[in-house]
Image: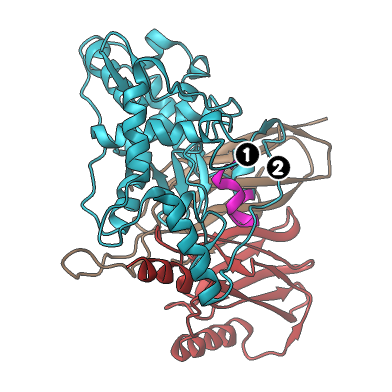
Chain colours: A cyan, B brown, C red
Amino acid sequence: MMKLAGVAGIFLVGFFGAVAYADPAEDTLILNEDIKMVTKTAAPAHLSDVMDEVYSGWLFRGTETRAMQADDFDNPGMLFVEQAEGVWNTVEGSEDKSCASCHGASEEMAGVKAVYPKWNETAGEVRTIEMQVNDCRENQMGAEKWGYTSGNMVNMTALLASVSRGMPVNVAIDGPAQSVWEDGKELYYTRTGQLEMSCANCHEDNYGSMIRADHLSQGQINAFPVYRLKNTKLNAVHSRFKGCVRDTRAETYSAGSPEFIALELYVSSRGNGLSVEGPSVRN
Amino acid sequence: MADGVKPRVKVPKTASAGDTITIKTLISHKMESGQRKDGDGNVIPRSIINRFTCDFNGQNVIDITLEAAISTNPYFEFQAIVPEAGEFKFTWYDDDGSVYEETKEISVS
Amino acid sequence: MELTRRSVLQLGAGILVVASVPLKAFAAGEDLIESFTGGADIAEGGVTLTAPEIAENGNTVPIEVDAPGASEILVLAMGNPTPNVATFKFGALSASHSASTRIRLAGTQEVVAIAKMQDGSFARASATVKVTIGGCGG
């Protein structure tokens, strides 16, 4: 079905004239003049039949936006990482613990974000990092759960991402997570909404094209949470999924729903090999 | 005092006497412009940081008047001369009367 | 149906939406310049304004002003509802009489920097920044 759409697309390109297209930027992201980030790499094996290379959304943004992310001081998202650092070390809940009581310094969490979402054997489910944070809060700290896309939660995911920056995304797509991954993959390729568009229509078939003045990326999520210049705050993955589904004029799923968990696992795996980049700066 | 306002300042730890250094400052603040309307159509009143100053050992480096067109989480980068060791003092003034401060020491080699 | 979807994407591609400069705001901007300079002559050059040609988002546009020997620089966004952006006053320990910040632009417009030099003269620089409308995600 995709191939048919692709052929139709080529026919229509000829019909309507050349589509505005721009290559992703030729640029290297060296964070704080120190950590070399992988923003472009060979596509993971499961994608080899549809694309050769995967690109971080960073390469689709303008010069000034890219520069804003290269320095932890210029990056406004890091303001919120600092706030989360404070929370990390603050005792909360009936058990009189802080995150640090069990986990030590936040730096000790390096490598964790890179493998999420992942299968949790004890719980018998695939978990996103937000689900795991809330599990710790509720069951280890005796504290109240945070709203899935609340300020507290997105700041914490930013902190957890920040200590994994430079490490390759590496989510498991086989084993017990496989059926959830397959569900996510199906969602990715299913057309929905009044506009009858799937994720793939934009992010696989048309990345690099201009949609009005926006440079369409591959829709990778290695760089979440994202500080968007547009709303000057951190945005969570599921918030972005909601926005995209809404933009196809479809009834959207909710943050934390099984559909979005599956989609997050699948979309993360499309970026396996790219560096964890969050918190990133985008338009 | 506006909620969650937190300053961040980047100043080199040392410099040679007479050096020029680059200072970066960021503060988390909504900078409500006074242009937006709420759900009922009422204008949300302006509430911004309206002034930022940087002083070193009592002498002024820069004094900035901010208007509503400065983005949320105001960011400034500027350069200062470091004549001797001492302390940089950064002050942000909020429309609501709050004053936020941050200081950074610098030593001279 | 496929025709419609594709055509929406193709036709929409690459169109920069250019907002026209509201004349009322422009007059207000000129007034602000008048009151800053007291009607004195303004030279071109002597102050540099660095701004992106195309701003990825009007909400956060990075700019830099630089005027060696200036005591003050006024920055105006001529097309904003209120053109005043910021005034930078340089103190005794200011090294380069330059500053960078991030501003909000309501639409494509001219950004103007007027520098007041230590000798009392004035200088002007301006840059047109295109503020674009994004695609789906806005």
Are discs 2 and 1 less than 8 Å apart at CB? yes
Left or right relative to A96: residue C50: right
Residue A106 higher or lower than B109, as above or below: above
Tell me if residue C68 can be seen.
yes
Mark number, residue A202: none
Q: Amino acid at mark 2?
A: Thr
Write the residue at 63% across / 91% down: C39
Q: Position of residue B87 (x, y in %)?
A: 65, 37
Across and down, in percent, residue B64 comes to 57, 61
Task: Give the magenta part as a residue range.
Answer: A52-66
Q: Is residue A77 above or below residue B60?
A: above
Horizontal side of residue A240 vs C115, given as left or right: left
Q: Does the segment drawn in magenta span residue A64?
A: yes
Label 2 CA crowd tier, 10 Å (few <14, some 14–19, many 20+): some
Quadrant of the rendering where the C terminus of chain C is positioned: bottom left
Residue C18, compared with residue B75, is above or below; it is below
Mark 1 belongs to which subunit? A
- Check the picture and name the quadrant holding the N terminus of chain C: bottom left
Q: To which quarter of the image does residue A241 belong?
A: top left
- What residue does disc 1 label? A39
Question: Residue at 38% of width from left, 53% of height from top?
Answer: B30
Left or right position of A65 against B46 = right
What amino acid is at disc 1?
A: Thr
Image-quadrant location for residue B48: bottom left
Residue at image coords 48%, 86%: C28
